[in-house]
């Protein structure tokens, strides 16, 4: 039975990570990236100049990466519907909903979709996008079986565990075994895995955590960028990655000990830290991002912790649909 005391909105989903250097959340954008482009509209978000490498935040831990004429997505969740999570009336029976009118203008193409874990705010739109674009879905065995349940062919699904380094020519994707964040009860929402093809999921509780991964993309002649989808990690698995940029999730609880100091040290103090998973992901994907007061405080705390643990790192608090070049 659902226990409200163990959820408290984001406790079960949020991850933490920080940034560095002086950054204020007054306008929710501070600490410019190494090379910031102007914001794009939904209509132009799908375009990319040949040879350009851009990173666009799609809320939660979602990203669109354009590498020349090739596109990689990370945890693309664009439908963003109401489950009651942000109003104190969370309903785990909320039907899964896909909104093509929201997704289609933003997703004109994709060759790979990297899934960190299979909670609904990370996986909900993945099967639809994969079917529409023909993109390969890279994720855990749970993501593989959920893909099959949605009717995707096995040849379009790439199960990984962590440790793989996948070569796509212009870029490589290193898969890192990781951990999901813990809520205030040191637990999480919808734990579990899928070890065989289940019936087609119908409600958000049909999408379990399914184990958690992180990814590092290394662009040929460009940056190395680390992506987290949840605010915990296996410290030893990060040693040696040393990314230029780290996209890190903001933590909703203090259940994970010394989260930011250990993370910054394990990643060898990235040049740029980009906090993610701090927005209200049940509101439309329009700027400025909607942020609950508690989440704004957590974001401030995260930035302060990064500043202390990694003072030479630079923090970028992103806006939706804005093309960043590192």
Image: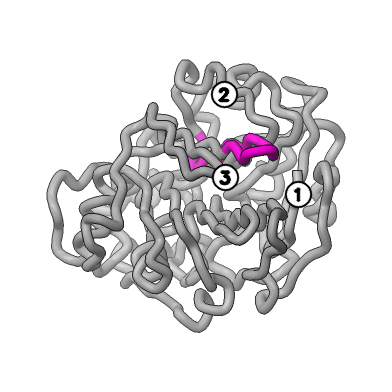
Tag of residue 325: 1
Label pair 1/3, CB-CB below 8 angstroms: no
Which residue is depicted at the point 64% across and 49% down? 295
Which residue is depicted at the point 75% across and 69% down? 40
Q: Position of residue 128 (x, y in %)?
A: 37, 70
- Compute the Cα span from label 2 to label 1: 20 Å
Which residue is depicted at the point 62% across and 57% down? 66
Q: Position of residue 289 (x, y in %)?
A: 69, 63
Other-residue count near label 3 (Cα within 10 Å), few / some / many at <14 / 14–19 / ≥20: few
Left/right placement of residue 59 relative to residue 49 reads left
Q: Which residue is nearer to you in this view: 181 or 75?
A: 75
Q: Which residue is mark 3?
A: 170
Q: Nearer the viewer, mark 1 or mark 3?
A: 3
> Above or below — where is 185 with respect to 202?
above
Q: Which residue is mark 2?
A: 241
Instruction: Determine which quarter of the picture holds residue 149.
Output: bottom left
Left/right placement of residue 97 relative to residue 85 reads left
Q: Position of residue 215 (x, y in %)?
A: 49, 38
- Compute the Cα span from label 1 to label 3: 16 Å
- Compute the Cα span from label 3 to label 2: 19 Å
Left/right placement of residue 310 relative to residue 275 reads right
Other-residue count near label 2 (Cα within 10 Å), few / some / many at <14 / 14–19 / ≥20: some
Q: Which residue is nearer to you in this view: 292 or 179?
A: 179
In magenta stretch: residue 318: no
Identify the magenta region: 218-231
Local secondary structure at mark 3: loop
Earlier in the chain: of badge 1 and badge 3, it is 3
Local secondary structure at mark 1: strand
Local secondary structure at mark 2: loop
Q: Which residue is nearer to you in this view: 144 or 255?
A: 144
């Amino acid at each position: 039975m659902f226990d409200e005391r163990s959820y408290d909105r984001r406790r079960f989903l949020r991850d933490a990570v920080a940034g560095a250097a002086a950054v204020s959340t007054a306008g929710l954008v501070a600490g410019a990236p190494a090379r910031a482009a102007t914001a794009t509209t939904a209509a132009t978000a799908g375009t990319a100049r040949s040879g350009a490498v851009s990173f666009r935040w799609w809320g939660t831990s979602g990203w669109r990466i354009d590498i020349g004429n090739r596109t990689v997505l990370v945890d693309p969740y664009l439908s963003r519907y109401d489950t009651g999570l942000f109003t104190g009336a969370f309903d785990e029976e909320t039907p899964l909903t896909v909104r093509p009118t929201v997704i289609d203008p933003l997703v004109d193409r994709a060759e790979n979709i990297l899934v960190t874990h299979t909670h609904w705010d990370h996986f909900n739109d993945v099967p639809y996008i994969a079917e529409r674009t023909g993109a390969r879905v890279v994720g855990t065995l749970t993501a593989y079986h959920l893909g099959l349940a949605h009717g995707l062919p096995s040849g379009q699904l790439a199960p990984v565990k962590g440790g793989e380094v996948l070569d796509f020519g212009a870029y490589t994707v290193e898969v890192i075994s990781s951990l999901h964040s813990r809520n205030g009860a040191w637990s999480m929402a919808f734990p579990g895995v899928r070890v065989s093809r289940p019936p087609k999921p119908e409600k958000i509780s049909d999408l379990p955590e399914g184990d958690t991964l992180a990814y590092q993309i290394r662009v040929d002649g460009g940056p190395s960028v680390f992506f987290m989808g949840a605010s915990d990690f296996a410290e030893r698995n990060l040693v040696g990655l040393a990314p230029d940029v780290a996209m890190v999730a903001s933590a909703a609880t203090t259940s994970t000990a010394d989260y930011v100091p250990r993370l910054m040290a394990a990643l060898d103090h990235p040049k740029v830290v980009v906090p993610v998973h701090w927005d209200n992901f049940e509101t439309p994907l329009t700027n400025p991002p909607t942020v609950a007061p508690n989440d704004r405080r957590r974001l401030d705390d995260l930035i302060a912790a990064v500043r202390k643990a990694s003072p030479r790192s630079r923090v970028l608090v992103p806006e939706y649909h804005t093309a960043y070049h590192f």
